[in-house]
């Protein structure tokens, strides 16, 4: 009934998305072959409506965490805005982390990820997926900082965890 209508609309929206041949911080840690195909304009696997909903949920979680940080009066929070982006020549584009903040006089970049139970349990033990590590490495180098903070949001329970990552 409604789910079928939503699925059809989201699948249509996904099919209308234009592929891009740009590499950004979000995909820099992917397979080299996949990146080569991306740069050279080969279309990847088409997204579907469910994938768009997953991305949408991640964006909403990010917005909520940034709101929580503002409400908690965390110093120097800057949400993702175009004026906060830094051009990275090697990528041929601009990158911007989810947020920047200061802690004990040190500036850090912050990355927010919504996660399944499995991924969240790993994050709580200090393990961060390689793709996320590469993404944060790009941000740390672009912004000239030594550390980044991954804020993990557990989708199933709304628990939060954080992992401090040092520059490689």
Image (cartoon, helix red, strand yellow):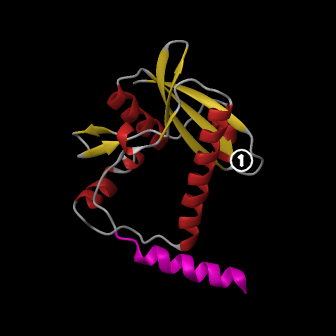
**Residue 29 falls in which quadrant of the image?**
top left
**Which of the image's four quarters has the N terminus?**
bottom right
Depth order, front residue of 71/133 = 71
- Give the magenta range: 1-18
What residue lies at 61% left-to-right and 26% top-to-bottom?
74
Residue at mark 1: 117
User: Where does the image place residue 114, in percent across and percent down from the top left?
Assistant: 62, 47
Q: Quadrant of residue 143?
A: top left
Secondary structure mostly taken by the magenta-highlighted segment of the chain: helix
Q: Residue at x 63, y 41 (%)?
A: 67
The local secondary structure at tag 1 comes to helix
Q: Is residue 45 left or right of residue 7?
A: left
Q: Residue at x 27, y 67 (%)?
A: 42
Q: x%, y% of residue 61? A: 63, 49
Residue 77 % position (x, y): 53, 31
Q: Of all residues shown, which one is farthest toward the right?
A: 157
The residue closer to the viewer here, 18 or 46, is: 18
Taking the image as shown, residue 98 lies to the left or right of residue 152, namely left
Look at the picture and state if 167 lies above or below 137. Answer: above
Position above or below: 44 against 36:
below
Q: Where is residue 71, by image quadrant? A: top right
Q: Residues within 10 Å of mark 1 (few under 14, many from 20)?
A: some
Q: Is residue 114 left or right of residue 106?
A: right
Q: Is residue 129 magenta?
A: no
């Amino acid at each position: 009934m409604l789910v079928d209508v939503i699925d059809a609309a989201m699948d249509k929206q996904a099919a209308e998305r234009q592929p891009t041949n740009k590499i950004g911080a979000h995909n820099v840690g992917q397979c080299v072959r996949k990146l080569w195909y991306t740069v050279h304009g080969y279309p990847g696997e088409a997204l579907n409506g469910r994938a768009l909903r997953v991305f949408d949920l991640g964006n909403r979680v990010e917005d909520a965490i940034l709101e929580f940080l503002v409400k908690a009066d965390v110093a120097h929070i800057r949400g993702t805005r175009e004026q906060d982006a830094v051009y990275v020549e090697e990528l041929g584009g601009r990158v911007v982390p989810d947020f920047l903040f200061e802690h004990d006089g040190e500036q850090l970049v912050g990355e927010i990820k919504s996660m399944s139970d499995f991924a969240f349990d790993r994050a709580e033990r200090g393990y961060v997926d390689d793709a996320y590590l590469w993404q944060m490495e790009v941000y740390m180098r672009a912004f000239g900082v030594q550390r980044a903070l991954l804020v993990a949001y557990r989708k199933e329970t709304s628990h939060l965890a954080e992992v401090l990552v040092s520059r490689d």
